[in-house]
């Protein structure tokens, strides 16, 4: 599982720092892309990755994902390059985004793994300059991130403003894309890995933020909005209703088996019955991300302020994990073990991991 934070307020005493996701990166990139389409020659930087290790001092994390069913393999999407480890962080290789590589000149923004075909992984690539060699869009790998190809250019969408996507459980080619400029008509569905798209019926919110399918019940979708809340569909987006028991904005949603975590501005909502009901289990904390492993859904990890928190009772109470060497920015838990978690840092770029549920952390990137 993976999750990227946007903005939060940590309400624990002594931890009032705020963090904001790289929305500026996205806004600038989309503006540059629009300029490029209009024939503008201006640019804000070079088209290839810095020659320095791991993209240089300006590089930072956008997403991190530990792959399900592909042992010890983790992908790190950054502003300058896509990095991959196949040995639990001992070594990392830049597999895309570098000079003369696939996705050259684009920033790697969001990762997702197919719910049906574990070797299939997607990444959303957005331009960081108006003269990027590669085509902005949704890219696809069928070998767990080793090799990449363009699945759908951003020009397939009305305003090339796709900023979020999700994978479906109806088949290996089912994927969803959210075009932020289209309001209640901003959800697109593809059944062939992005080759063709169909606009979904009217959404329940004009400000959709993300979408999640249910591996056990394909077509049972959860759509969340960082402005208006959480919605569910039982028929693959043909109709929607508010998620039962959830109030207020929802920042992100993650699933571990039948357990669903939905942190938002009212606190943390949790469902233990596959979304049939949600309960507000924590009103004191506002987390930007909560993740857990399918192997142990009640053992979860959360980002709050400069701290990673852990729970062993499904979010009813939390304790701080050991301190990390840098400010944590994104988390992913190993699908095969609830005790193995990777945390990505932004400035400077880095990754640490724990094998004992957050009691200790070890830096694994840079190596």
Image (cartoon, rainbow, N blue to C red):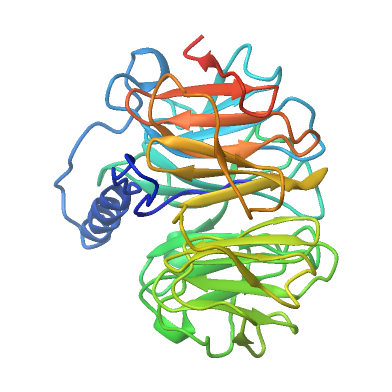
What residue lies at 59% left-to-right and 18% top-to-bottom? Answer: 360
What residue lies at 76% left-to-right and 78% top-to-bottom? Answer: 276
The answer to whether residue 23 is above or below residue 309 is below
Q: Nearer the viewer, residue 178 or 173?
A: 178
The answer to whether residue 278 is above or below residue 169 is below
What residue lies at 81% left-to-right and 35% top-to-bottom? Answer: 336
Q: Quadrant location of residue 128?
A: top left
Does residue 137 appear in this view? yes
The answer to whether residue 210 is above or below residue 229 is above
In this rendering, the count of numbered labels is 0
Does residue 103 appear in this view? no
Horizontal and vertical percent for residue 327? 38, 30
Horizontal and vertical percent for residue 310? 60, 39
Find the residue positioned furthest to the front.
13
What residue lies at 58% left-to-right and 45% top-to-bottom? Answer: 318
Horizontal and vertical percent for residue 80? 38, 31
The answer to whether residue 153 is above or below residue 75 is below
Q: Quadrant location of residue 260?
A: bottom right
């Amino acid at each position: 599982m993976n999750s990227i934070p946007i903005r939060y307020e940590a309400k624990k005493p002594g931890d009032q720092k705020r963090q904001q996701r790289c929305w500026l990166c996205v806004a600038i990139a989309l503006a540059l892309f629009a300029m490029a389409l209009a024939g503008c020659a201006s640019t804000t930087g070079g088209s290839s990755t810095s020659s320095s290790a791991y993209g240089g001092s300006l590089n930072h994390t956008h997403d991190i994902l530990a792959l399900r069913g592909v042992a010890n393999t983790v992908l790190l999407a950054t502003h300058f390059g896509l990095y991959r480890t196949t040995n639990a962080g001992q070594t990392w290789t830049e597999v895309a985004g570098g000079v003369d590589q696939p996705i050259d000149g684009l920033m790697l923004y969001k990762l997702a793994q197919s719910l049906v075909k574990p070797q299939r992984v997607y990444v959303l690539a957005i331009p960081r300059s108006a003269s990027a060699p590669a085509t902005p869009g949704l890219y696809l790998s069928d070998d767990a991130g080793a090799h990449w190809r363009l699945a759908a250019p951003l020009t397939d969408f009305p305003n090339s403003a796709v900023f979020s996507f999700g994978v479906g459980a109806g088949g290996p080619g089912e994927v969803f894309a959210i075009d932020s400029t289209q309001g209640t008509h901003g959800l697109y569905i593809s059944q062939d890995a992005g080759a063709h798209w169909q606009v979904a019926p009217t959404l329940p919110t004009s400000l959709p933020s993300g979408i999640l399918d249910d591996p056990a019940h394909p077509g049972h979708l959860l759509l969340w909005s960082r402005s208006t809340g959480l919605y569910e569909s039982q028929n693959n987006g043909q109709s929607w209703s508010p998620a039962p028991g959830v109030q207020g904005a929802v920042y992100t949603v993650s699933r571990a088996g039948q357990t669903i975590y939905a942190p938002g501005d009212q606190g943390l909502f949790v469902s233990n019955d596959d979304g049939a009901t949600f309960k507000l289990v924590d009103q004191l904390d506002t987390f930007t991300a909560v993740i857990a492993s399918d192997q142990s859904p009640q053992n979860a990890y959360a980002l709050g302020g400069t701290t990673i928190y852990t729970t062993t009772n499904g979010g009813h109470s939390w304790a701080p994990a050991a301190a990390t060497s840098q400010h944590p920015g994104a988390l992913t838990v190993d699908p095969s073990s609830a005790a193995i978690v990777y945390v990505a840092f932004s400035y400077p770029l880095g990754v640490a991991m724990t094998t004992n549920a957050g009691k200790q952390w070890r830096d694994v990137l840079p190596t």
